[in-house]
Every structure is written in structure tokens, then in C-alpha cells.
């Protein structure tokens, strides 16, 4: 056997020792020359999509230069002559309210009254929005309902006499990119920006809304960082444009891809030139686009700039954005000496429960019914103890009630602060405000006009979800303030106003009459090329203007407002540079006191502090 294997082994060794050369593969033949062809829009989009799929997670930080659409497959149902369509997916803005569209189509020949109710699930569960409408014969009507961003989904019910429609469900979509609300078609948006549509890792998350059926309340725009009008501005309904203009003037960022020729008439607060670019507008900004490529790049930069966080809760969480930053309650696991999230101080004194005093009363009760009851039972017997213990308990409870009534009372305690841009040409007031509230009992409801809204902080541990009927503006029915709970609400409003500051000549001097609707504490006005000091005046009173050196009038708006540091932090995104500009001829800057001019000023409150800064133009001389 060994003799047979020996030659085989020797042969294998010789083969292993001899070098074996592998032939290199021939290079592929050169491709035939082809004429260079300009890439089409579809080819560029395919290239961007393929690149984004290859790079994958790298685009979490470096997103694709494009947008994705938040698409929704509507739920439809028909009962009798009424057809209902509800959007199942709604883009959730950073704050405020998400716009939910319910389309009602009356296919009959008689008008029909319908009520749309929305009940949310998850955080802030309950009925939060409702609206009653009348749908004319063969009319197709879009009904918009503001859904608080704290809600992640819910149920829609349409109630109408004689019909029984099933319930519809919806959910809100967390945007992958910066959320943008676009009034116009996708084709108009692409034509005006040259931005491609991509599948993943987009810079912008877009929801398209038909211009003719767009929302007509400020609340449905206020929470969005960017709102774009992609089509013809002149084709928008008048009340829709009023809501958009109010959105821009109260701190929003409005983008017009095709500015009309009369843009200075449609945007009355524009100062100076109306050329392309970004223009300050009240408390917000307006971009007037020119070339489509430049507008697309600018739109991406605007989205990045307007979505930078400015304040967030201690311990992380979703950043809170916007011009007004009402402080949120602290979570239960972070309760300490501070009452609010992020270490913010309450703007009302004494809003903490008097735990120390209550513990003192309870300790006296325990001593009275414990050692005191034992001593009483030994000296007087068990019958005396049966009478004494309920009596002591009654006195203790009565003491707690008396303390609540005489110290806290039943009134609504509040501090109110606002900034007011008085537009005398339009007889209106553009306002951005903040209110802090505390009460033993929940206050009654109140009404907020269509061009005004309430904004609360959106926090995971204790969402502030207001319940409202939106039939005629915002009628608050609940959720504004729970009993024995401190809350802060931001307010935005553009309201008709006859407030004015009238100046007339009297001899060589000037007299001023305060018709601003609030007590005037101090201020300045520029007339005849000089700066004059405004005296302290009650509402309706008159006084004499005092000339002062121009150097002495260079107080900033922030110093004149006398806002404390804690209040100033709530107004962190206010464009103080615009308020601090030198006064033009006839311009004034005044500090007012009292409840202010915001819609919630109608609430009967016990005012702890009221400070309001107003800038405008005087009437006369």
C-alpha cells in the first residue's frame, strides 16, 4: 500500500512547488462616444432619489435638497344626499394647531345643517373642536378644524338631522423635514422653487392645500414656521388673505412665490422697497420671490432659520418654537423649588399650594385627636371623645376652607403682557401677548375672534388642550384653566381698533389726548423734528408734551417696557430691532398699563401686573 501511495504523494508535491500564473482579465472595450445630453427634470429627480437611497443614514444630518409631500388617503362615506370626506393624515406643525379638513358635499336640492365634532385620543383625550355649518344645495364645502398638536389622532363625527353617518378616524403626521404649508398645487410649487420631490431625507415636509378652500382663521396658520403661497395671490378669497396677512404680522414667515404688483397695498405694513428678498413685517417676515432657482434655495435657508430651537425643557424633549414661549408645568419627576419646566419662574406670586400652613393645621389636628383624645377619654370618658373628635375635624376642615376663601378667593388672578403695533391707516392693532393665570375655580368660557388665537406649550407630561367651538371664531368652552392650577397662554391677534393718540397745538406747545384704551404710563413721540415726552395719563385724559434732548430719548423698547427677565424670556423671538428703530415723524412709543387690548382682556381678573408696549403713529397735529 505504501509503495502505491509514494508516487502519488511525490507528484502532488511537485505540482505544489511549481508556480501557477493566473492570467489577468482583459480590460473591457471602451464604450462608444455619446453626445452629451442635458439631464431632464425626471433624470435629476431619479439621481437624487438613488443617491439618497445609497447614502441612507448619512442624510439624517445632511438632507436632500428637496421636499416630500404628506399624503392622505381620505375616508369617504355617503348617507342620503350627503357625501363626507375626511383627511386621514394631517401634517403636525411645531406648535399650535394642526389643520384637519372635512369636505361636505350636499348632493340634494335643499340646504342641510351639519355639525362636525372632533374627539382626540392619547394625550389631551376628549372632544376638542367642533363647528356647525350650513351646506347649500349641491354645494361642496371644506370645513377646517384646528386640532391641538398635543393630539396624535382622533375620531371625526358628522351630525346632521335625519342621517346617521359613521365615525371617521385620522392621525397627525410627524414631519420628516421642516413642516411647510403650501397654498397651491404641487406643479405651481415646483415651478416657483425648482425643488424636486424626493422620497426620503427631504429638507421640507409639505402639505398642499387648494387655495380656494384654504383655512380662514389665524389659528390654522399660527403654528407653522413657514407658509407658502404658490399660486396667484389675487385669486385667494379675501378672508383667506386676511388670515395670511395676520399670520405674517404676528410673527409668522410668509413666502409669496409670485408677488402681485399691488403687494404694497395687500401688505400694508411693508416699509420701504417692495423688491425681492426678506422684509420685516410687523412682528414677522415676508419673502417676495423672484427667480425660481434662487427662491428654492432661499426657502430651504428660511426653513432652517425659522426652526432653530430657542428654549427647551430641562432634561431634553421637543424644543418649543415661536415668537411667544409660554412656560410649561414641570413634570412630576422634576418637581423642586421651581414650579415650571426648565427652571422658569411663575409670573404670579403665591401660586404654590400653601403646603406648610396646611401641614401645620393637620399636625394640630393629629395632636388634638391623638394625645389630646387619649387624655380626654381618661378624664371625661369615651362619650366625650365621640363628641370631641368630629368637632375637631369639622374645625380643621373649616379652617382650610376659610383660608382658601379669604386668601386665594374665587377670582381669577392674572398677569398680562403684550406688544402692540398700532396700524392707524387700517384702524387695527397687531398684538403679540402672554397671560399667566391662576384660580381656585375654573373660569367661564369666552370668545376669541377669527384673526386671533391662543397658543399653549406642547409638553408630553401635561398637554394644554383647549376645547373650543369654531362656528364663529373660537368660543372657548373648556381646558383653558383647571382649578388651583397655574397656566400660561400665548396670544396672537389682529383686531379692529379705534385706539389712537391725538396731538393738537395749543399756543407754542403741544397737548396730547390718550384714547388708547388703557392708562398711559410713559412714552415718546417725534414731532417737528424733535422728541417729546408723553406724560402719564389715564384713558381719555389730556396732558402737555414736554420737549427733551434727543440723546435722552434713546431708551430701547425693552427698557421702556420694563419687562422683568422672566417675562423677557417668554418674548425671546420678538424682533426688538424693529421696535427699537428711531421714531419717524409722527411716530410714538408708549408703555401702557392695565389688562391690555388682547381678546382675553374681557375676562374679569384680579390683575397682579399689566405691562404693554405700543408703537404707532399719532393723529395730528
Image (cartoon, grey):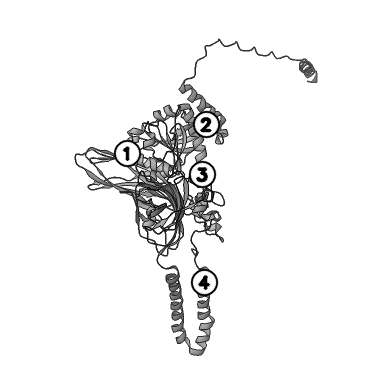
C-beta proximity under 8 Å, tags 3 and 1: no
Q: Nearer the viewer, mark 3 or mark 4?
A: 3
Q: Residues within 10 Å of mark 1 (few under 14, many from 20)?
A: few
Question: Which residue carries the number 2 mark?
Answer: 64
- Please name whichever residue, 522 or 69, is drawn nearer the observer in this view of the structure: 522
Q: Residue at x 42, y 47 (%)?
A: 616
Q: 19 above or below 118? A: above
Q: 584 above or below 256? A: below
C-beta proximity under 8 Å, tags 4 and 1: no
Q: Nearer the viewer, mark 2 or mark 4?
A: 4
Inter-mark Cα distance, 2 to 1 = 36 Å
Question: Which residue carries the number 4 mark?
Answer: 357
Q: Which mark is residue 238?
A: 1
Q: Residues within 10 Å of mark 2 (few under 14, many from 20)?
A: many
Q: Earlier in the sequence, mark 3 or mark 4?
A: 4
Helix, strand or loop for disc 3? helix
Instruction: Estimate the x, y position of residue 215 in percent, counting from the top left.
Output: 35, 41
Q: Earlier in the sequence, mark 3 or mark 1?
A: 1
Instruction: Estimate the x, y position of residue 620 in percent, counting from the top left.
Output: 37, 47
Q: Nearer the viewer, mark 4 or mark 1?
A: 1
Q: 550 above or below 188? A: below
Amino acid at each position: 500500500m505504501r509503495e502505491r501511495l509514494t508516487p502519488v504523494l511525490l507528484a502532488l508535491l511537485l505540482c505544489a512547488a511549481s508556480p501557477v500564473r493566473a492570467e489577468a482579465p482583459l480590460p473591457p472595450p471602451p464604450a462608444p462616444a455619446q453626445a452629451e445630453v442635458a439631464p431632464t427634470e425626471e433624470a435629476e429627480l431619479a439621481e437624487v432619489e438613488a443617491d439618497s437611497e445609497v447614502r441612507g443614514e448619512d442624510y439624517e444630518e445632511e438632507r436632500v435638497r428637496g421636499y416630500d409631500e404628506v399624503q392622505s388617503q381620505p375616508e369617504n362615506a355617503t348617507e342620503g344626499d350627503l357625501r363626507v370626506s375626511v383627511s386621514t393624515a394631517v401634517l403636525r406643525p411645531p406648535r399650535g394647531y394642526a389643520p384637519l379638513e372635512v369636505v361636505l358635499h350636499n348632493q340634494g336640492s335643499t340646504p342641510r345643517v351639519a355639525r362636525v365634532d372632533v374627539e382626540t385620543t392619547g394625550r389631551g383625550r376628549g372632544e376638542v373642536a367642533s363647528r356647525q355649518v350650513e351646506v347649500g344645495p349641491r354645494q361642496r364645502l371644506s370645513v377646517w378644524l384646528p386640532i391641538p398638536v398635543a393630539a396624535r389622532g382622533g375620531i371625526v363625527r358628522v351630525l346632521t338631522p335625519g342621517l346617521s353617518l359613521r365615525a371617521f378616524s385620522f392621525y397627525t403626521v410627524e414631519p420628516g423635514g421642516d413642516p411647510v404649508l403650501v397654498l397651491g398645487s404641487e406643479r405651481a410649487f415646483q415651478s416657483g422653487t425648482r425643488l424636486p420631490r424626493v422620497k426620503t431625507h427631504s429638507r421640507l415636509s409639505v402639505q398642499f392645500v387648494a387655495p380656494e378652500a384654504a383655512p380662514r382663521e389665524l389659528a390654522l396658520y399660527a403654528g407653522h414656521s413657514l407658509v407658502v403661497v404658490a399660486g396667484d395671490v389675487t385669486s385667494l378669497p379675501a378672508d383667506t388673505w386676511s388670515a395670511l396677512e395676520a399670520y405674517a404680522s404676528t410673527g409668522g414667515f410668509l413666502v409669496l412665490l409670485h408677488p402681485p404688483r399691488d403687494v404694497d397695498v395687500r401688505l400694508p405694513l411693508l416699509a420701504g422697497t417692495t423688491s425681492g428678498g426678506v422684509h420685516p413685517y410687523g412682528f414677522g417676515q415676508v419673502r417676495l420671490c423672484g427667480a425660481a432657482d434662487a427662491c428654492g434655495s432661499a426657502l430651504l435657508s428660511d426653513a432652517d432659520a425659522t426652526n432653530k430651537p430657542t428654549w427647551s425643557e430641562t432634561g431634553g424633549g421637543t424644543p418649543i418654537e415661536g415668537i411667544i414661549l409660554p412656560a410649561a408645568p414641570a413634570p412630576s419627576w422634576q418637581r423642586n423649588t421651581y414650579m415650571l419646566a426648565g427652571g422658569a419662574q411663575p409670573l404670579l406670586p403665591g401660586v404654590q399650594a400653601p403646603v406648610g400652613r396646611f401641614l401645620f393645621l393637620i399636625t394640630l389636628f393629629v395632636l388634638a385627636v391623638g394625645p389630646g383624645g387619649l387624655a380626654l377619654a381618661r378624664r371625661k370618658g369615651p362619650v366625650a371623645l365621640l363628641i370631641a373628635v368630629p368637632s375637631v375635624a369639622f374645625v380643621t376642615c373649616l379652617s382650610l376652607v376659610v383660608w382658601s376663601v379669604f386668601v386665594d378667593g374665587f377670582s381669577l388672578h392674572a398677569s398680562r403682557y403684550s406688544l402692540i403695533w398700532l396700524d392707524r391707516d387700517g384702524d387695527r392693532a397687531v398684538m403679540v401677548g402672554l397671560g399667566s393665570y391662576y384660580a381656585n375655580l375654573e373660569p367661564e368660557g369666552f370668545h376669541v375672534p377669527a384673526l386671533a388665537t391662543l397658543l399653549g406649550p406642547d409638553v408630553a407630561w401635561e398637554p394644554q388642550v383647549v376645547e373650543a367651538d369654531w362656528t364663529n371664531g373660537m368660543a372657548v368652552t373648556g381646558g383653558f384653566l383647571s382649578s388651583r392650577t397655574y397656566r400660561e397662554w400665548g396670544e396672537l391677534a389682529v383686531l379692529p381698533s379705534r385706539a389712537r393718540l391725538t396731538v393738537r397745538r395749543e399756543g407754542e406747545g403741544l397737548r396730547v389726548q390718550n384714547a388708547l384704551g388703557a392708562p398711559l404710563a410713559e412714552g415718546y413721540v417725534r414731532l417737528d423734528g424733535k422728541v417729546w415726552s408723553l406724560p402719564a395719563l389715564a384713558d381719555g385724559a389730556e396732558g402737555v408734551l414736554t420737549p427733551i434732548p434727543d440723546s435722552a430719548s434713546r431708551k430701547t423698547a425693552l427698557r421702556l417696557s420694563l419687562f422683568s427677565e422672566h417675562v423677557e424670556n417668554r418674548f425671546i423671538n420678538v424682533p426688538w430691532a424693529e421696535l427699537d428703530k428711531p421714531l419717524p415723524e409722527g411716530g410714538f412709543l408708549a408703555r401702557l398699563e392695565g389688562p391690555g387690548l388682547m381678546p382675553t382682556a374681557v375676562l374679569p381678573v384680579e390683575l397682579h401686573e399689566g405691562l404693554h408696549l405700543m408703537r404707532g403713529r399719532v393723529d395730528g397735529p
